[in-house]
Amino acid sequence: MLLTAHRGLSSLAPENTLASISKSKQLGIDWVEIDVQLSFDNVPVVFHDANLLRCCGVNKQVSQLSWDQLKYMDVGSWFRSEFVHESLPSLSQCLELCASLDLSLNLEIKHYQGRDLILLCERIAQCIEQHGFPASQLLFSSFSQQALQIMLERLPNVRRGLLCRRLPPDYLEQLKRCQAYSVHCHFQEISRLQVKHLKQNGYIVACFTPNNPQQVTHLRDWQVDVLITDCPQDFVTQWQL
Ligand code: G3P
Ligand code: MG
C-alpha cells in the first residue's frame, strides 16, 4: 500500500507549504498531495481554500490577489508560531522542491466556481512543462471531470485520478471518459464491493483522508492501493509499511 502525504505532511507542518513537502521527505514518504488554483494574475499557487481566512487570517479570496500579494502571506503561524516565516508557495516553487527531493506529486486541480477552468489547466500545464517535471512522478486529480479531460488532451502522459467523495452511479463511464488511472474516494464512503469492482476493471483505488490506522484496517484487507493521509507516519509505524 502506498502512502501519500495529504496537503504535504500536514499533521506535522502547515498544509500546502514547502515545509510540509520537506517534512514528507524527512519521514520517508515518497508521494505528496497538494492543491493548486490561480491567483488574480493567473499564477498557479498552492493553497486549499478559495478564501485566505483559515490559514492566513485575511478575509479575501485567493482569486482577488496577485502573486506579488500572495507570496508574502503567512501560511504558517496559524499552525504553530515556529512556522511564522512559511509563505504561500507557487506551484513553480513546489515543483522545484519536489524535483530536488525526488518526490512524486499528486497535484489536485482545485476548480472554484466562477473561475476559468481552461485557463487554470493551461497555466498548470505550462508550469509543468517549464520545469520539465517527469510525468512518471506526477498524478493529476480533480473533483472536476472536465479538468481531467482537458489534461488528457494537454498532457496525455500524466496520469489522472478522478476525485469523488462517493462513487457516482455511472462511475465506470466517468472514469473511461477521462481515461483515468485511479479513483480517489472518501474512506468512509466506499464499500468492499466497489473496491473489488474498480480493481477488477483495472483502476487504482485511493482513499482520503483516514488519519487513524486502527480505525481503517479494513482498507488494507480490501487491498486499497493508496491512502492519502495527514498522518502517513502513523501508518508506517502501526501498520509497519
Ligand atoms: O486529494 C484528496 C483530498 O485532498 C481531497 O479533498 O478537500 O482535502 O482537497 P481536499
Ligand atoms: Mg486536496
Image (spheres, grey):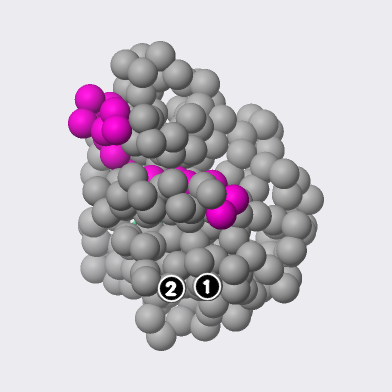
Quadrant the C terminus occupies: top left
Is disc 2's CB within 8 Å of ligand 1?
Answer: no
Cβ(mark 1) to ligand 1 < 8 Å?
no
Q: Residues within 10 Å of mark 1 (few under 14, many from 20)?
A: few
**Where does the image place residue 206, in percent across and percent down from the top left?**
45, 46
Inspect this view and state whether residue 30 appears. yes
201 or 163, nearer to the observer: 201
- Assign a secondary structure to mark 1: helix
Q: Please tell me which residue is depicted at 29% across the width and 28% down the height of the picture.
A: 217
* Image height of 108 relative to 212, above or below: below
Residue 204 falls within the magenta-colored stretch: yes
Quick check: 94 above or below 227?
A: below
Q: Nearer the viewer, residue 22 or 82?
A: 22
Residue identifier under label 2: 170
In the rendered structure, find residue 89 and report the number of the disc placed on it: none
**Looking at the picture, which amino acid does disc 2 mark?**
Asp
CA neighbours of label 2 inside 10 A, class few (<14), some (14 to 19), many (20+):
few
- Label 2, secondary structure: give it: loop
Residue drawn 32% across the image and 22% down it: 234
Q: Is residue 237 magenta?
A: no
Question: Which disc number belongs to residue 173?
Answer: 1
List x then y, in percent, for residue 59. 24, 68
Q: Which amino acid lies under the numbered mark 1 shown in the image of this protein?
A: Glu
Report the side of 43 relative to 231 (left or right).
right
Residue positioned 33% across, 45% down in the render = 192
Q: Are marks 1 and 2 in contact (CB under 8 Å)?
A: yes
Which residue range is magenta in the image?
Answer: 201-218
